[in-house]
Each structure stands twice: as structure tokens, then as C-alpha cells.
Image: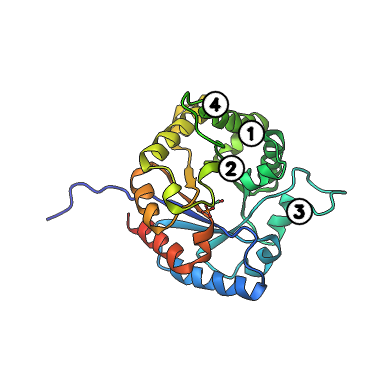
Amino acid sequence: MAKIHTTAKKHFILVGNWKMNPDTLEDAKKLFSALSRKAQKTTKVSVVIAPPYPFIGPLSGKSDVISIAAQDVSNEPRGAFTGGVSARQAKAVGATSTIIGHSERRKAGDTDEVIAQKTFEALDAGLRVILCVGEKERDQHAHYLRAIRDQILIVFSKIDKKKASWITIAYEPVWAIGKSYDTAPKPSDIHEMSIYIKKVISEVLGQKPGLKFQVLYGGSVNFENAQAILSDGAVDGLLVGRQSLDPDAFGNMIEYANNL
Ligand code: PGA
């Protein structure tokens, strides 16, 4: 019998944030090709890997199914900023996107203003942005919602709104990053936050683009909780730390998202 009703499958984004791992280029290449093999059969998942800066060039172009992100970029376009890496430089060696505002960068001193400027620079250089937002802790009176709202609105006040669709928000509650895997919030809490984030963005961009805005979840994701979050968390994907260094675990997430 002919199908009367088909549901369009959702397209997920899975980002692997390698942080300051692994130690050598050789290991980075091995890990990357293992992940690339796992991602080979996917049709419904965009896989993005964020390696440390020195590995971006050597890994870019090595997979036709994985794109490369930087983990951060400078808030300055160029000049006398020793140790800095500009958005244009990251793009020049093969990054197509960058993470900005990760809590580990915020902890190292990035203020909301700096993050907004970094986002401006990245978009100006033609990079997509994975903008991390998240509360340090939750309080009974839901003041943490205000913190998330402020983190988002300051960035949107600095950028050219025409480029807003190049941003993906990653909701990463600081209290759930790098912890035991049962610390991750429940899918229903993530669902709630995803809707809240879309509402905040709707205030700036209007309802239609706001509600369509891509929101990822990150913070102590493993294959087990990834399944529940992808199914019931109302998110467009995941930002995965430790488990993106394990090709089997990350590969399982890719496969699961592809079949959802
Ligand atoms: P984690 O890291 O998955 O190891 O908690 C997530 C992140 O910091 O992006």
C-alpha cells in the first residue's frame, strides 16, 4: 500500500569538542579517521569536530563527511596579540565554524562583551558559530534563566542580524560539564530550556526564525543519555566533550541520530 503520510526526519548536528586532546598529531589523525569511518554512512547528521588549533590544518580536507571547527577565536581581527588566533586564520587552515563562549573560556576570563566581539569577528570572517551559553547553577527562583537570556542578548546586540542564522546555540549548563554522566539534566529540563532559548531569540529575530533556531545540548553526554536527549530534549543535536574522543561512543551517537 502506498504511504499516505511521511514524516520528514530531523537533521541533527553532532559536535565533538576535543578540548586540549590528544597529545600528538599522529593520535589526532588516527582518532579523526576512526570517527570519519563511523560518520561515513550518515545522511541525516552533520558531524563537526573541534580539534586543538595545531591539528586543524592537517585534518581539514581529510574527511568528506566531517567538518572542522575551531574551539575559540580571538576578539581581534589581527595585530599585536601574542598567542592569539584570529577567525580568519582559523578559516584559512580549514575551519568552517568555531565554538565561542565555552564555559572553560569564560572561566579563563572571557566576559559576555568579549564573547559578543568574538562572535562578530567569526561571522565577519565567514565562520559559523557554535555559541555556548549556560548557567553556573540553578536557583529556586529561576534567576538562572535571566543569566542565559543576558548571555544571548548581548551577542545578538553586537552582530549583523542578517548573519544570525550562522549561529547555533549550545546550551551547556556549567554544573553539568565534565561531570559523571548521570549529572546531565533530564530531557524534559533540556526541552524546557531549548524552548526558552528559542523564545529569547524570537524577541530579537521574530517568531518564525526564532522558533527554527538551532539549539544543541552539551555537558556530560554519553551514548546512554544521548538517546533520551535526542529523542525527547527538543534539541537539534549535541556538543560532546570526553565521549568524542571515543570513536565507538561517538559513532553510536551518530548512528542513533541518523536513524531517529
Ligand atoms: P563533557 O564536555 O561532554 O566532557 O562534559 C562537554 C563540553 O565541555 O563541551
- Disc 4 residue type? Arg
The residue where tag 4 is placed is: 146
Q: What element carries label 1?
A: helix
The residue where tag 3 is placed is: 85
Q: Is residue 70 above or below residue 160?
A: below
Q: Which mark is residue 131?
A: 2
Q: Is mark 4 on a helix, strand or loop?
A: helix
- Disc 3 residue type? Val
Q: Which of 97 and 108 is in front in this view?
A: 108
Q: How many marks?
A: 4
- Disc 1 residue type? Val
Task: Give percent across and percent down for residue 107.
Answer: 67, 43
- State how far apart marks 4 and 1 are (Cα): 15 Å
The residue where tag 1 is placed is: 155
Marks 2,4: beta carbons within 8 A: no
**Colour scheme shown:** rainbow
N-terminal of the pair, mark 4 or mark 1, is 4
Q: Nearer the viewer, mark 4 or mark 1?
A: 4
Q: Which mark is residue 47?
A: none
Marks 3,1: beta carbons within 8 A: no
| Residue at (40, 56) in percent of width and height | 44
Mark 3 C-beta to ligand 1 under 8 Å:
no
Marks 3,4: beta carbons within 8 A: no
